[in-house]
Image: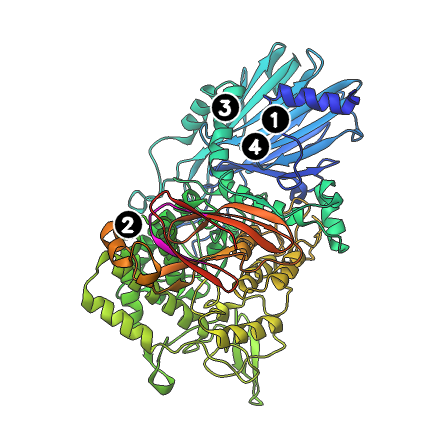
C-alpha cells in the first residue's frame, strides 16, 4: 500500500520521536487542525510539580509554564493571594510558513502524556513533542525534521514578573523573589544534534541541527513545614541549574517518563463505544455534540482526561491540585486559584480512589495536615476551637485564608478523604497514624458543639448552606439570597456532614478497637442527630424551616451531601429520602456551573438514574468558546468552564462516570450462612475486618446511550478491582479481584451474591 506524503511524514516523525506515538484513539487523544489562538485552546502537560500549556504555533511556538508552589501570601487571615504564572518559553522558526499548512496536526495523547505538533513545508516534515517528566522533574521539548540540518530556531525564556534573563552558551536562566520572600528560579538548556547553539541577546539560536532537545526546569524554595516558615535551605537557582545540566538524553528521559505515567494511567481502561463523529478533531466533536450528535467516545475521552489531569497535577510529595489543577496564565486568577473547601477541593479528589489513583490522593492528606497545624495555632478568634480545628472556605498552601466565610464543617468534609483512602486500600497503619487522629479530634469538636433542637434532636448551632441562605424581607416573606451567611441552626448541610463524620469515626473505631466510652458517645450523638427531612413540596429540606423555593436553581446543592459524597441517603436503604432527593434535583435543574453539573452527575448516579446522569454529562460537554463567558460546559481543550475555567469540573465528571459504572458505598451486615468460610472464621484470618461488608454494585446507572462497552480496573471499597463488560445494555460478565481478602456482596439489579475471596483471588460473575 502506497502512503500519502502526510501519512509517510507522520510515520517518520513517530519513529523519530522514539516510537512512542500511537495511532489516534478517539478515547484517549485530543487533536486539532490548527494551533491554539487562546490559552483555553492550548494543551496541558504536567508532572505533579510543573505544568505547561502548549500552543503549537508554526512560525512561533508558545509554551506557558507553571510550578505549583509559586504562591504569594502568608499563613495569616486574609493572607491568600493568587497562584502565579511562572513564565513563558517561546520558539521562533525563521522561514516557517505564515499560514497553517494543510497537513498540520496538534494533539495531546493521554496514554503517553505528550503534546505533539506535526506539519510539512517545502517538502520537509517538522515535528515537536512536549512532555513533563516527574522522574527528571522538568519539561522536555523535542524538535525534529526530515531534512538533515532542518532544525533552526531561536529559544527565548521570560519571567512573568519581567526579571532579567541570563544567557551562557546553551543555557538561559532567571531568578527572583515574591513579596512574601519566596525565592524562585527557572532554567532552560538546549542540546542540538549537529548544527550549532549560541547565546545571543535575543536568546539561544540553534542553526542547522538535525534535531534538538530543550530541558526546562522551575522551582521555588517552598517546603510544606510550618515550623521552618515554609522555606527550604537550597536556593532554587542551584536546583534548576543542576536539573537541566544533568538531564538525560531525550530517549532515556522519555522512557522513564512514559513508564512513570503509564504505571498509573493504564490501571483503568474504558470503552463506551464510538461513532463516525469520534474520528473528528476534538473541537469539531464538541460542536457536533452540541447539535445532538451521538459520540459516546467523547464521554470516554472526558473520563480519561480527568485521570490524566490528576496524574499531571497531584503526585506524592507535591501540593494538591488547586482550582486549576496547576495550570494558570493569570496574575489574578479567579478565586485565587487556591483551595476552596465547601466542595471544590474535595471534588478534585472524588476520582482518586475509584479510578485507581490512590497515590495522587497523598498531596491532599499532606496539605490537610499542614492546614490543621496552622489552624490549631491561629490567633483568629473566629476559628479558635477547644479541640480539633476549623477553617475558612478558601485557603492557600501556607494554611492562610481569605477571611471570607468561616466554614465550620469544612474540616470534617476534608478528613473524610482520609477515611475513603482506608476504605479502598485497607491501609491500617494509615488509618491508625493519620486518619483516626483527625476523625477523633473533629468528632470531639462536634460532640461539644451540638445543641438540642426540634423534638430534642441534636443540631449544629450556626450552620450555613453554601453559598446562599434564607432572608426575611420587611413584608415578612422569606427569600433565598445569594451569598447570605446568616447563621442557621440545623442547616441540612452541617447535619449531614456531622453524621458522615460520626459514621466514619465509628467504623474506624471498630477497626482500631478504640475505647468503648468514646465509641458510645459518638454512637449516641449520631443516633440523636436531626436527619434529612422531607418538605412541603416533597423535597429534601435545606434548612431547619421549610422555606425551600422550588424555583431556586442555585449552583450549590449542599443539602444533598447525604446522597453524595455521603452515604446517608440511598435508594436501597432510604427510598423515601431518595425520592425526595430526586424532587430537589429536578427543581435545581440540569444546568449550572461546570462543577455543579459534575456534582449532579454523581447525584443521579447514586440514584441509579443513568439516563438522567448522562443528560447532565451531555450538558457538561456543551462547547464554550475560549474567549466567551457562556459557561457550564467545556472549552475547546476540554477544560471545564465555571466560567471561568475550573478544573473541578473535569475531576468531578470523571468521578461521576465512575459512579455510573460501579458503586461500593453501601454496606450490608454479613450473613454467616451465605459466606464460605463463615465470617467468624474470616475474622480470625483478616486483621481489622469490619462488622459490615461493602456492597459492590455493578453497572448501577448505565444509560441507554452506552449500550455496549467495558470498564476495567475500577476500584471498590473493601479492596477490590472490578472489570465489567456489557452488550445491548446487559451485563455480560464482571470479574472482581480481592486485594485484601475481605468479604463482599456483589449486586447487579435485583441479584445479590455474597462472596468470601482470599487475598489475590478473583471471581467472575455472569448473570
In the rendered structure, find residue 253 and report the number of the disc placed on it.
3
Q: Residues within 10 Å of mark 1 (few under 14, many from 20)?
A: some
State the residue in front, 728 or 615: 728
Position of 173 with respect to 496 (left or right) is right
**Mark 4 or mark 1: which comes first in sequence?**
4
Assess whether mark 4 and mark 3 are in contact (beta carbons under 8 angstroms): no
**Tag 2 secondary structure:** helix
**Tag 3 secondary structure:** helix
User: Is 645 located above or below residue 562 in the figure?
Assistant: above
**Mark 2 or mark 1: which comes first in sequence?**
1
State which mark lies toward you, 4 or 1: 4
In the rendered structure, find residue 112 and report the number of the disc placed on it.
4
Q: Is residue 739 magenta?
A: yes
**Tag 4 secondary structure:** loop
Q: Is residue 567 magenta?
A: no
In the rendered structure, find residue 428 and report the number of the disc placed on it.
2
Q: Residues within 10 Å of mark 2 (few under 14, many from 20)?
A: some
Magenta-drawn segment = 736-746
Assess whether mark 3 and mark 1 are in contact (beta carbons under 8 angstroms): no
**Mark 2 or mark 4: which comes first in sequence?**
4
* Spot occupied by residue 12 in the image (x, y as percentages of width and height): 68, 19
What secondary structure characterizes most of the magenta part?
A: strand
* Residue 639 visible in the current orientation: no
* Spot occupied by residue 405 in the image (x, y as percentages of width and height): 45, 65
Amino acid at each position: 500500500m502506497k502512503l500519502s506524503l502526510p501519512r509517510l511524514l507522520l510515520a517518520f516523525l513517530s519513529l523519530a520521536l522514539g516510537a512512542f506515538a500511537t495511532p489516534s484513539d478517539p478515547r484517549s487523544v485530543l487533536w486539532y487542525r490548527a494551533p491554539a489562538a487562546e490559552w483555553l485552546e492550548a494543551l496541558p502537560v504536567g508532572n505533579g510539580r510543573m505544568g505547561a500549556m502548549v500552543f503549537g504555533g508554526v512560525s512561533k511556538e508558545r509554551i506557558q509554564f507553571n510550578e505549583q508552589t509559586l504562591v504569594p501570601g502568608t499563613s495569616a487571615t486574609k493572607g491568600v493571594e493568587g497562584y502565579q504564572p511562572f513564565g513563558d518559553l517561546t520558539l521562533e522558526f525563521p522561514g516557517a510558513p505564515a499560514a497553517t499548512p494543510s497537513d498540520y496536526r496538534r494533539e495531546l495523547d493521554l496514554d503517553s502524556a505528550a503534546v505533539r505538533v506535526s506539519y510539512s513545508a517545502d517538502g520537509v516534515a517538522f515535528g515537536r513533542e512536549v512532555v513533563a517528566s516527574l522522574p527528571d522533574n522538568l519539561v522536555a521539548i523535542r524538535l525534529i525534521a526530515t531534512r538533515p540540518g532542518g532544525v533552526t530556531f531561536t529559544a527565548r525564556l521570560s519571567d512573568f514578573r519581567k526579571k532579567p534573563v541570563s544567557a551562557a552558551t546553551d543555557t538561559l536562566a532567571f531568578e527572583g523573589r515574591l513579596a512574601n520572600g519566596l525565592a524562585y528560579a527557572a532554567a532552560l538548556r538546549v542540546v542540538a544534534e549537529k548544527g550549532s547553539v549560541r547565546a545571543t541577546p535575543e536568546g539561544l539560536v540553534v542553526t542547522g541541527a538535525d534535531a534538538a532537545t530543550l530541558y526546562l526546569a522551575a522551582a521555588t524554595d517552598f517546603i510544606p513545614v510550618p515550623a521552618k516558615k515554609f522555606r527550604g535551605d537550597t536556593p532554587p537557582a542551584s536546583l534548576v541549574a543542576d536539573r537541566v545540566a544533568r538531564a538525560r538524553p531525550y530517549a532515556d528521559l522519555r522512557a522513564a517518563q512514559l513508564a512513570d505515567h503509564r504505571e498509573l494511567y493504564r490501571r483503568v481502561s474504558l470503552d463506551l463505544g464510538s461513532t463516525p463523529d469520534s474520528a473528528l478533531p476534538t473541537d469539531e466533536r464538541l460542536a457536533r455534540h452540541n447539535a445532538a450528535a451521538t459520540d459516546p467516545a467523547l464521554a470516554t475521552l472526558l473520563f480519561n482526561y480527568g485521570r490524566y489531569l490528576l496524574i499531571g497535577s497531584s503526585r506524592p510529595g507535591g501540593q494538591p491540585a488547586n482550582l486549576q489543577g496547576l495550570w494558570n496564565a493569570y496574575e489574578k486568577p479567579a478565586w485565587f486559584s487556591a483551595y476552596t473547601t465547601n466542595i471544590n477541593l474535595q471534588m478534585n479528589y472524588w476520582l482518586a480512589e475509584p479510578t485507581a489513583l490512590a497515590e495522587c490522593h497523598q498531596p491532599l492528606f499532606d496539605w490537610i495536615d499542614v492546614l490543621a497545624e496552622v489552624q490549631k495555632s491561629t490567633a483568629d478568634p473566629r476559628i479558635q476551637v477547644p479541640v480539633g480545628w476549623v477553617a475558612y472556605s478558601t485557603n492557600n498552601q501556607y494554611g492562610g485564608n481569605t477571611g471570607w466565610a468561616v466554614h465550620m464543617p469544612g474540616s470534617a468534609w476534608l478528613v473524610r478523604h482520609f477515611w475513603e483512602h482506608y476504605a479502598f486500600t485497607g491501609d491500617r497503619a494509615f488509618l491508625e497514624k493519620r486518619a483516626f487522629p483527625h476523625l477523633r479530634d473533629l468528632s470531639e469538636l462536634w460532640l461539644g458543639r451540638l445543641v438540642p433542637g426540634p423534638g430534642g434532636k441534636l443540631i449544629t448551632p450556626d450552620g450555613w448552606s453554601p453559598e446562599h441562605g434564607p432572608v426575611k424581607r420587611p413584608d415578612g416573606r422569606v427569600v433565598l439570597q445569594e451569598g447570605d451567611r446568616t447563621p442557621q441552626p440545623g442547616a441540612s448541610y452541617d447535619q449531614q456532614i456531622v453524621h458522615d463524620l460520626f459514621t466514619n469515626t465509628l467504623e474506624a473505631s471498630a477497626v482500631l478497637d478504640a475505647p468503648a466510652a468514646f465509641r458510645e458517645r459518638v454512637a449516641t450523638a449520631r443516633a440523636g442527630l436531626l436527619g434529612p427531612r422531607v418538605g412541603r413540596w416533597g423535597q429534601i429540606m435545606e434548612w431547619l424551616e421549610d422555606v425551600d423555593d422550588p424555583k431556586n436553581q442555585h449552583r450549590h446543592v449542599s443539602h444533598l451531601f447525604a446522597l453524595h459524597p455521603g452515604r446517608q441517603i440511598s435508594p436501597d436503604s432510604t427510598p423515601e429520602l431518595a425520592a425526595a432527593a430526586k424532587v430537589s434535583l429536578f427543581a435545581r435543574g440540569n444546568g449550572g456551573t461546570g462543577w455543579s453539573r459534575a456534582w449532579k452527575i454523581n447525584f443521579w448516579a447514586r440514584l441509579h438514574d443513568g439516563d438522567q446522569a448522562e443528560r447532565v454529562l451531555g450538558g457538561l460537554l456543551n462547547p464554550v468558546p475560549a474567549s466567551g463567558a457562556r459557561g457550564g460546559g467545556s472549552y475547546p481543550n476540554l477544560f471545564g468552564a465555571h466560567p471561568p475555567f475550573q478544573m473541578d469540573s473535569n475531576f468531578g465528571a470523571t468521578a461521576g462516570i465512575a459512579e455510573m459504572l460501579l458503586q461500593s458505598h453501601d454496606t450490608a451486615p454479613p450473613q454467616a450462612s451465605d459466606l464460605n468460610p463463615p465470617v467468624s472464621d474470616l475474622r480470625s484470618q483478616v486483621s481489622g475486618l469490619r462488622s459490615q461488608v461493602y456492597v459492590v454494585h455493578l453497572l448501577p446507572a448505565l444509560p441507554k446511550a452506552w449500550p455496549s462497552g467495558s470498564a476495567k480496573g475500577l476500584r471498590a471499597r473493601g479492596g477490590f478491582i472490578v472489570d465489567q463488560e456489557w452488550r445491548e445494555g446487559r451485563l455480560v460478565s464482571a470479574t472482581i479481584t480481592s486485594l485484601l481478602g475481605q468479604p463482599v456482596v456483589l449486586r447487579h439489579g435485583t441479584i445479590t451474591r455474597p462472596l468470601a475471596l482470599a487475598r489475590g483471588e478473583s471471581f467472575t460473575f455472569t448473570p
